[in-house]
Image: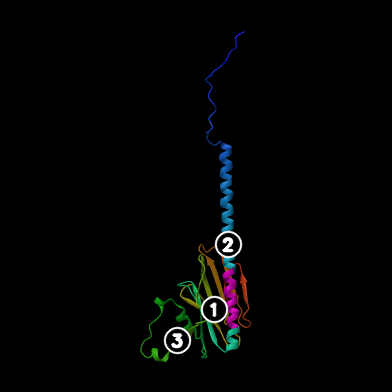
Amino acid sequence: MSDISVVGAGFKSAPTDRGMSLIELLVAMAIVGIMFGLAAVSFSNIFEVQMKGTSAKIASTIRYLRSKAITEKLYLRIEYNFDDQTYRVESTKDPFVISKEELTEESKPEAEKKEPKGDETEEATPLKSVFSEEESFLLKAVKLPNGIFWKDVWMGPIQEKRTTGKAYTFFFPNGYVTSTVVNLRNEDDDSHYSLDIEPYSGHVVIRSEYLEPGREE
């Protein structure tokens, strides 16, 4: 019986490259979706930490300024600036009286302020000319982190809420602090933090929500 050998039977090997099956495609899409979801949650958590940290830093500054005003017999104020999204500290040793008309005028954006006429320049003593910016490194102007903005600031002494220009909190040598409500927001204005500054104790209450101002001074 002769040996039978088969050489080159003509069979082709199965292709190694093939497209993704429907199940594999669905699995891949699910993985991508989970990754995007985790990234969104992570970004949200980072922003929450940043907003909380900014609020805590402002609150610490307020507590420090109250103590500084008492121990150094100074008149201090924080300027919340909507134009450049900063806050800075100014001081004076000269007593002053908070005038609603004057403070309202000073709080306006520069373009809206009225030019003094005639004797008004000599008779008026603007608060801005009384206060000068603190030169201390610890109290230099601070810009809000990216993505965080002033929403509004309610000034107790004049019962007015500012959303543009400038707003202020004042500190006196006797420990009194003008009541202020500071609201922070994110870029989409759908996430808020608030700082409620109590006048007699200088205590600051931080809330992870918008606080509608309106407490009587």
* Region of the chain picked out in magenta, as a range: 53-66
Query: In the visual, does 142 lie left or right of 203?
Result: left
Residue 169: x percent and y percent?
Answer: 54, 80
For marks 3 and 2, the one nearer the N-term is 2
Q: Spatial distance from mark 3 to mark 2, Cα to Cα? A: 41 Å
Q: What residue is pinned by disc 1? A: 138
Q: Is residue 111 magenta?
A: no
For marks 3 and 1, the one nearer the N-term is 3
Q: Spatial distance from mark 3 to mark 1, Cα to Cα? A: 23 Å
Q: Is residue 57 magenta?
A: yes
Q: What residue is pinned by disc 2? A: 46
Report the residue at 41% width, 91% height from top: 123
For marks 1 and 2, the one nearer the N-term is 2
Q: Spatial distance from mark 1 to mark 2, Cα to Cα? A: 25 Å
Residue 201: x percent and y percent?
Answer: 64, 82
**What amino acid is found at the position of numbered circle 3 in the picture?**
Ser
**What amino acid is found at the position of numbered circle 1 in the picture?**
Leu
Front position among marks 3 and 1 = 1
Of residues 57 and 97, the one drawn nearer to the viewer in this rendering = 57
Quadrant containing the C terminus in the rendered view = bottom right
Q: Residues at badges 1 and 2 in contact (C-beta under 8 Å)?
A: no
SS class of the residue under badge 3? helix
SS class of the residue under badge 1? helix
Specify the label residue 87 is tagged with.
Answer: none
